[in-house]
Image (cartoon, rainbow, N blue to C red):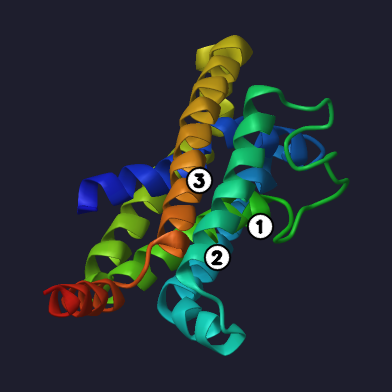
Amino acid sequence: MNLLSATILLFLIMDPMGNVPLFLSVLKHVPPERRLPIVIRELCLALVVLLLMLFFGRYLLIALDLRQESISMAGGIVLFLIGIKMIFPPRDGIFGSSISGEPFIVPLAIPSVAGPSMLAALLLLVNREPDRMGTWLIALLIAWATSAAILCASTWLYRFLGENILTALERLMGMILVAISVQMFMDGVRTSITPPVEHSASTSIRMDADRP
């Protein structure tokens, strides 16, 4: 996976267009002058969580003795459920009913921006190619910055595009996320049932040696 594809993947998982109605719903009871500072604060908190997972997530996998294919399948399942909810949203929203008062961390930073599928995607990228940490960092920062710009302009986007267009975009991103989640799950299953290369090679050599 190159920088462009990784950036697009992370951007789609963050789903800023789909999060615009959620942000507006959560912040509707907050004074207008406080909304932008809250959005910026929550986005920065989400970035901190994502960076921690990017740099230290591998050690968490080692400590918990989790295999890459387990993370791939679990992340695919979670991403599939979120994609389905984006296509067929419940009445109280993707992440449940909105909270009263000023939000802090939940639900804007976590799980709307730094959600479980986003954390799983970062773990997969780093675990598959740990020597390309710089590429994954740049992809994360670009995806986050683009999402942050969209979410900071959520009020303007809602007025300019309207609810119908935002809903259509959310459905479209949901379809894309469902496809990505199925691919993640299939990759995990394929990796778990494929024998190691060394084992396959040694088996082939033994079979050739046993032939008359």
Disc 1 to disc 3: CB gap under 8 Å? no
Give the percent coordinates (x, y) of residue 119.
53, 62
**Could you tell me the amino acid type at mark 3?**
Met
Report the residue at 79% width, 52% height from top.
Answer: 102
Residue 31, above or below 46: above
Residue for badge 2: 70
Element under disc 2: helix
Toward the viewer: 188 or 146?
188
Distance from disc 2 to disc 1, alpha carbons, whole Å, reads 22 Å
Residue for badge 3: 14
Say left or right for 112 vs 125.
Answer: right
Toward the viewer: 103 or 67?
67
Kindly give the residue lying farthest to the bottom in the view shown: 63
Give the percent coordinates (x, y) of residue 126.
36, 70
Element under disc 1: helix
**Could you tell me the amino acid type at mark 2?**
Ser
Say left or right for 196 vs 46.
Answer: left
Say left or right for 206 vs 154.
Answer: left
Residue 44, above or below 31: below
Toward the viewer: 20 or 90?
90
Residue 76 visible in the snapshot = yes
Q: What label sits on residue 110 in the rendered view?
A: 1
